[in-house]
Amino acid sequence: MTRKTGYVWHEKYAWHDTGTHAGLVPSGGYVQPYRNFESPDSKARLAGLVEVSGLLEQLVRIPAVEASDADLLRVHTSGHVERIRSQSLAGGGDAGDGFSPFGASGFEVGKLAAGGTLAAARAVLDGTVDNAYALVRPPGHHAEPDQGRGYCLFANVPVAIEALRAEGRLSRVAIFDYDVHHGNGAQKIYWDDPDVLTISVHQDGLFPVDTGQVSEQGAGAGAGTNINVPLPAGSGDGAYWSAVERVAGPAIRAFAPDLIIVSSGFDPSAFDPLGRMSVTSNGFRGIAERLLDIADDACDGRIVFSHEGGYSAVHVPFCGVAVLEVLSGITTDVEDPFQISIGASPTRTLTAWQTDVIDRSAALARALGMIVTE
Ligand SMILES: [Zn+2]
């Protein structure tokens, strides 16, 4: 079955300037200037493969528009927004943690990333497309109300959600985050909000090091609506598929959202320089297939992917095209050549020590079902 899939990409996303950090750390002293891991490469090359594969002409192009100041201020403090604006005007700066540099157009590109996610979600709610993928940059899932973190300037997904809630277009939302890093931004923003379910599957103790544990479950009216699945390093396709089947599926079906938004990071890839997981492009394909099934059951198939991390310039394009093939139901001629290297790795299969963690998070998903049906 083919579906009408919306697609957001703007060349300016590739022009976001992350300077001369050596991968992760600022250059200086004995650290020779190099390139940031968060460079345009993986995203621009994914956009390139979307075009060369022939997918582009079969997707519905959704123009990216900048989020407004009012959109940003529903989620962020005015202090944070003004700091990004003024640094940007001054030629560049850092979003807040010393590891998130941006150049002269940082403020505009940041607004374009949040606005691109909003445009994709709006198109799905309008029914002009069945689902959508917003290939945006910079990412957003580490940004908090009062600061940027981890390469993120603004919280793209919450900015989109809050704009649509303000319009009365949206009430209940589920966020599912499979980026290798913890989705700390959404967790913090929606900690006590009972109408936004936040689920993050990530590498245990990676970044941020102090958040992402199973015990963090939300508070107040939002108690029980935050679920973390901190998988051990080395986890692959089987662990991720199990986490989607046993945690995201029951939780989202019980929660009955109007829309699912996926924070789509390809840094669980076996080739990622920052993550230590071993997911293949077929693994990401399987995650997307399962998420589409959940969306069909929970909210008439309404699902939007917003691009987050993923730093293997050579592997991310194949992972992204696999996901877009699932969303659209279109099969291209693209075959992932990296399967030769990792396609038969034993890390693909689920292990007992990964199941231990998933069991604990699955119990929270079951509890959520009981809360909702009471
Ligand atoms: Zn990440």
Image (cartoon, rainbow, N blue to C red):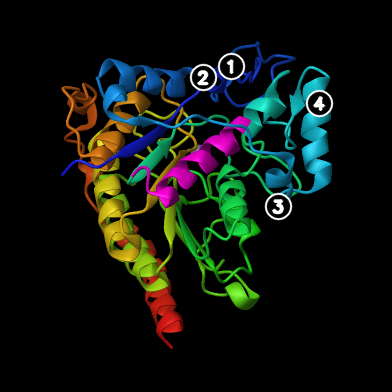
Amino acid type assigned to the residue bearing label 4 in the image:
Gln
Q: Earlier in the sequence, mark 2 or mark 4?
A: 2
* Mark 2, secondary structure of its residue: loop
CA gap, disc 1 to disc 2? 7 Å
Identify the residue under disc 3: 74
Q: For this view, does 255 lie left or right of residue 152?
A: left
- Stretch in magenta: 112-129
Residue 150 position in % (x across, y down): 62, 37
Amino acid type assigned to the residue bearing label 3 in the image:
Arg
Q: Nearer the viewer, mark 4 or mark 3?
A: 3
Q: Earlier in the sequence, mark 2 or mark 3?
A: 2
Q: Is residue 144 above or below residue 45?
A: below
CA gap, disc 4 to disc 1? 17 Å
Q: Earlier in the sequence, mark 1 or mark 2?
A: 1
Amino acid type assigned to the residue bearing label 1 in the image:
Trp
Residue drawn 70% across the image and 20% down it: 105
Q: Earlier in the sequence, mark 4 or mark 1?
A: 1
Identify the residue under disc 4: 87
Q: Earlier in the sequence, mark 3 or mark 1?
A: 1
Residue 144 position in % (x across, y down): 68, 48
Q: Nearer the viewer, mark 3 or mark 1?
A: 3
Dot 2: few (<14), some (14–19), or many (≥20) neighbours within 10 Å? many
Identify the residue under disc 1: 15
Residue 294 position in % (x across, y down): 30, 59
The reply to whether dot 1 and dot 2 touch (C-beta < 8 Å) is yes
CA gap, disc 2 to disc 4? 21 Å
Amino acid type assigned to the residue bearing label 2 in the image:
Pro
The reply to whether dot 4 and dot 1 touch (C-beta < 8 Å) is no
Q: Nearer the viewer, residue 57 or 173?
A: 57
Ligand 1 is within 8 Å of the C-beta of the residue at disc 2: no
Identify the residue under disc 2: 40
